[in-house]
Image (spheres, helix red, strand yellow):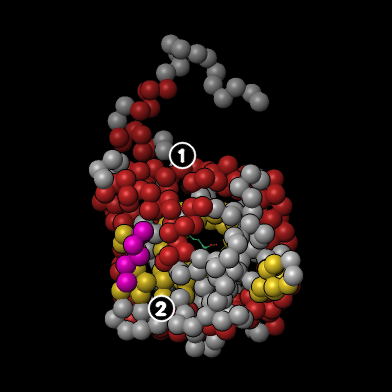
Amino acid sequence: MTSPVSGQFPGVRPRRLRQSAALRVLVAETRLSAHQLVLPLFARPGRKLRREVAAMPGVFQLSPDELLKEAARAYAAGVHAVLLFGIPDKKDAKASGAYARNGIVQQTVRLLKKELPTSLVITDVCLCEYMEHGHCGVVRRDAHGARVLNDASLKLLAQTAASHAEAGADLVAPSDMMDGRVRAIRERLDADGFAETPILSYAAKFASAFYGPFREAAESAPKFGDRRSYQMDPANAREALREVALDIQEGADIVMVKPALACLDVIHRVKAEFGYPTAAYSVSAEYSMIKAAAAKGWIDERAVTLESLLAMRRAGADILVTYAAVDVARWLKES
Ligand code: PBG
């Protein structure tokens, strides 16, 4: 590599460009904008329901009417994209609630697209919230224990995605990590007349301890075992690139890396290698850790949140999924 600087001190003085706020902002390589933000929201059946998630202050399980209000508030603050999760009343062994025509996500999507038609509604496509065992696919028990079946899960995932599209979802976002699910979903969407519905795939999703608080929010913790037979080992970056390559071959339009802060290297390599629209999911524990430390007065919530998101942008993320999206949009407006 040729040297990025010609000359040396005292001719070269990097501090020259750091002297004033106006100068610093002029040479900033990376910027944050509300246009990059996606707000995750949790829908559950009911009316006038706002149940705060204990480990995620400021995040609520919401009935569809309340979720609409929250989405409208976000929209007014400049956050025009939401990512929906559903918590059904009943769970079973085939995740019926995930693809029910009038399931909680399907209902909420219809309401949002009717009342807030210019908002972008993305739906998380997974089975864990709807399965009685809390796994992201179909489980078979035999003499050797329980296994999450890949191919049997694909049909249910494809059906779920199609039912979200039918309800009006603008994008579908599979997060299950079964092999071949992007292709299964693409084929099903095309067959059902939704060839124009893009897929945002959670392409490189690690089996991460940073999802802890989410499982309380979505009531989706596995009842036995863990997700390491389908989500990726945090030790692996080259495997993450293969996962992303496969998803792109199968038809993913946007690829996501998750978690974000612990995977900045992966975000960087994915963007550099493929140049695809790339999303980073700043997951539940990233949010909870900042909230908890800020509540104790140990860190500056706003500064730490903005710096974290800026780091994801610098790594290569185009799209930032964050529970702090509305605060962030307000902070950006103020500054
Ligand atoms: C569902 C799903 C999870 C998250 C997003 N989609 C949980 C998991 O895989 O256990 C995590 C999001 C977060 O922690 O904020 N499969």
Q: Is residue 280 magenta?
A: no
Amino acid on which disc 1 is placed: Glu
For the question of whether residue 277 can be seen, the reply is no
Q: Along the line of sight, which residue is nearer the eye, 215 or 66?
A: 215
* Residue displayed at 56% across by 25% down: 4
Q: Which mark is residue 81?
A: none
| Numbered mark located on residue 29 in the image | 1
Mark 1 is surrounded, within 10 Å at the Cα level, by few (under 14), some (14 to 19) or many (20 or more) other residues, namely few
- In this rendered view, identify the residue nearer to me: 20 or 210: 210
Q: Which quadrant, please, contains the N terminus?
A: top right
Looking at the image, the residue that sits furthest to the top is 10
Residue 17 placement (x, y as % from top left): 38, 27
Q: Is residue 54 magenta?
A: yes
Which residue is found at the position 41% from the left and 35% from the top? 27
Specify the segment rendered in magenta.
Answer: 51-56
Circle 2 packing at 10 Å, graded few (<14), some (14-19), many (20+), is many
Q: Within 8 Å: ligand 1 and the Cβ of disc 2? A: no
Q: Secondary structure at mark 2?
A: loop
**Which quadrant of the structure image shows residue 232?**
bottom right
Q: Nearer the viewer, mark 2 or mark 1?
A: 2
**Observer-nearest of 29 and 123:** 123
SS under mark 1 = loop
Per the image, the residue denoted by label 2 is 44
